[in-house]
Image: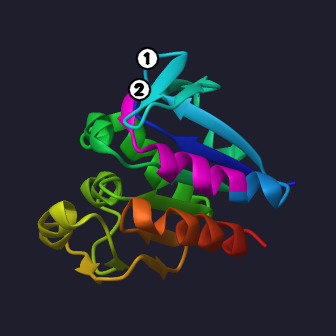
């Protein structure tokens, strides 16, 4: 069984960017753990309330096969977060899948992990990705090696399927 960590903002994560990939992954037999910062119950921008399993400060990347950063306006809380950047760096260093959707690719770009790599993100994040050396593509989902990026809510299903397929 594959173990996937999904990191969401304490408030204003994008509901479908968590819930659609989470369902796809769980339906394929993966165990999904939800992490956040400073809360036991996270609130989505569309009304979802989600139980947080673990604080990002307690994450041990070695326990997961993939780490997914979920977007939404609340994800700005992780843009310059040392713990989030460390989790992202460890994920790649350990040869695991690192995924981010919507505005969350800026988190991994800010961690220095998209330099020279193809990626996509919500249009508002394109200039940040470019400034960090990413090659921005106007596609719903882009995979380069172990890094998977998604454009936004409309890409949530395809993003989840790409993560699932990459874990096989």
Pinpoint residue 47: horizontal percent, then vertical percent.
45, 31
Quadrant for the C terminus, please: bottom right
Q: Residues within 10 Å of mark 1 (few under 14, many from 20)?
A: some
Q: Which mark is residue 38?
A: 1
Quadrant for the N terminus, please: bottom right
Q: Are marks 2 and 1 in contact (CB under 8 Å)?
A: yes
Q: Is residue 88 left or right of residue 3?
A: left
Task: Name which quarter of the figure residue 81 lies in.
Answer: top left
Colour mapping used in the image: rainbow
Residue 33 included in the magenta stretch of the image:
no
Task: Name which quarter of the figure residue 157 lies in.
Answer: bottom right
Total numbered badges shown on the rendered structure? 2
Q: Is residue 25 left or right of residue 91?
A: right
Q: Looking at this view, name the residue that lies furthest to the front.
A: 47
Which residues are the magenta region?
11-23
Main secondary structure along the magenta-highlighted residues: helix
Q: Residue at x 50, y 40 (%)?
A: 7
SS assignment at label 2: loop
Residue 40, relative to residue 46: is it above or below? Answer: above
Of labels 2 and 1, earlier in sequence is 2
Residue 35 vs residue 90, the one in the foreground: 35
Q: Residue at x 50, y 50 (%)?
A: 16
Residue 83 vs residue 53, the one in the foreground: 53
Report the residue marked by disc 2. 10
Pinpoint residue 86: horizontal percent, then vertical percent.
42, 43
Q: CA distance from mark 2 to mark 1?
A: 7 Å
Residue 53, relative to residue 132: is it above or below? Answer: above
Q: Residue at x 37, y 36 (%)?
A: 45
Residue 1 vs residue 102, the one in the foreground: 102
Q: Residue at x 35, y 58 (%)?
A: 102
Residue 84 visible in this rendered orientation of the protein: yes
Q: Residues within 10 Å of mark 2 (few under 14, many from 20)?
A: many
């Amino acid at each position: 069984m594959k173990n996937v960590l999904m990191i969401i903002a304490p408030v204003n994560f994008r509901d479908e960017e968590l819930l659609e990939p989470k369902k796809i992954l769980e339906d394929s037999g993966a165990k999904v753990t939800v992490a956040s910062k400073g809360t036991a119950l996270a609130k989505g921008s569309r009304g979802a309330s989600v139980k947080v399993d673990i604080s990002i400060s307690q994450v041990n990347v070695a326990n997961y096969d993939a780490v997914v950063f979920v977007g939404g306006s609340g994800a700005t809380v992780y843009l310059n977060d040392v713990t989030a950047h460390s989790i992202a760096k460890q994920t790649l260093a350990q040869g695991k899948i690192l995924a981010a959707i919507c505005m969350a690719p800026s988190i991994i770009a800010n961690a220095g992990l998209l330099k020279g790599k193809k990626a996509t993100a919500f249009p508002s994040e394109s200039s940040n990705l470019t400034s960090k050396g990413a090659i921005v593509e106007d596609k719903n989902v882009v995979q380069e090696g172990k890094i998977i990026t998604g454009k936004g809510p409309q890409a949530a299903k395809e993003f989840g399927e790409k993560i699932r397929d990459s874990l096989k």
